[in-house]
Amino acid sequence: MTLWLAFAVYCLQIFPYANSATYHAKGDYHCNNCCRGLPGPQGVPGLPGLHGGRGQDGMMGPKGDKGEMGFKGSTGSQGLPGDDGAKGQRGRKGTKGECGPQGPIGPKGDMGPRGYAGSTGTPGPKGEKGSRPPRIAFTVSRSEPLGPVMQKVPVTFDKIHTNLGDSFDVYSSHFICKTNGTYMFMVHVLSAENRTAYGWIMLNNDHQMAFHGDADARHGTGSNTIILHLVRDDHVWVQLNENSALLNHFSSFSGYILFED
Ligand SMILES: *[C@@H]1O[C@H](CO)[C@@H](O)[C@H](O)[C@H]1NC(C)=O
Ligand SMILES: *[C@@H]1O[C@H](CO)[C@@H](O)[C@H](O)[C@H]1NC(C)=O
């Protein structure tokens, strides 16, 4: 505004004559033949003109200098994976690994060959004195004739030659086992004249071994032997069959232990 006021004052000072000339021209027009008066006082300066319209664009200026380098941008998002690379070369041999844990017990192996015989050991200490082995033995015989008998009968023996261990029972004429073990028994008979002597060695109620003396021999003889395993309370005895007869003094019954159990 100040600029426009200054410009207006400047114009008035430059063209004061023009203004008066205008007045002069008008005065000439209205009063062409009038006498001319004195020039009037200077008019009041006019108001500033209206704001002018926008001017045309100026000519394009020269190209500016190259700007400075910009700031580094932020990191972009990760790209897609690339194709597999070519197979690499074989690497160098690695260092030996640590020893693994102990494995399970394997199957039992085959039996090895028989070893050599060992050397003889030193004798052991002398043992305690053993118990005295049993002494069981007997021999008995008849002093009287027997028969002929009407039925099977046990032969009794009245003469006791030996009875070690007291296992022959003189009342029943049975050997009665007191000690378990293995025993041997023998019987021998002589028949009465023209009579048979036929009988058995008995174990309890069982016939074990026969003997026979024939009547046709006039004095027949019969004998037999047996080895028996006996346990306590077993009975061994001599049985004579019916119609048999024995002579006196010649029939005997013997036995003894072989091994104790
Ligand atoms: C036994 O038989 C014989 C022959 O037959 C005879 O000679 C003998 O007299 C008989 N003895 C007795 C005791 O019968
Ligand atoms: C004898 O044998 C019998 C029958 O086998 C048995 O019961 C008993 O114990 C035995 N006695 C001894 C002293 O061995």
Image (spheres, grey):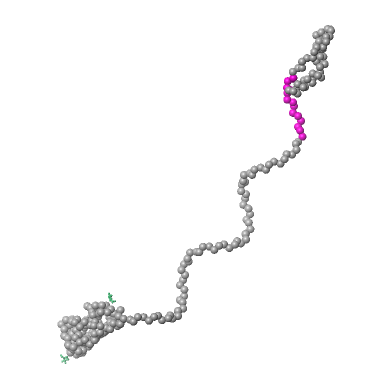
Q: Main secondary structure of the magenta part?
A: loop
Asked whether residue 40 appears in the rendered view, the answer is yes
Q: Residue 61: horizontal and vertical position, in percent?
A: 76, 33
At 61% from the left and 62% from the top, the residue drawn is 93
At 53% from the left and 62% from the top, the residue drawn is 100
Is 84 displayed left or right of 187 in the figure?
A: right
Q: Residue 229: horizontal and vertical position, in percent?
A: 28, 79
| Badge count | 0
Q: Quadrant of residue 241?
A: bottom left
Q: Quadrant of residue 253?
A: bottom left
Residue 54 in magenta?
Answer: yes
**Camera-side residue: 187 or 223?**
187
Instruction: Tell me the quadrant of ligand 1.
Output: bottom left
From which residue to which does the magenta span run?
A: 48-62
**Camera-side residue: 7 or 121?**
7
Q: In the displayed orientation, state which residue is furthest to the top.
A: 34
Q: In the displayed orientation, state which residue is furthest to the left.
A: 150
Q: Residue 149: horizontal and vertical position, in percent?
A: 16, 83
The answer to whether 29 is drawn above or below residue 81 in the figure is above
Is 63 displayed left or right of 185 in the figure?
A: right
At 25% from the left and 83% from the top, the residue drawn is 165
Q: Name the image quarter holding the C terminus.
A: bottom left
Residue 186 in magenta?
Answer: no
Q: Quadrant of residue 96?
A: bottom right
Asked whether residue 184 appears in the rendered view, the answer is no
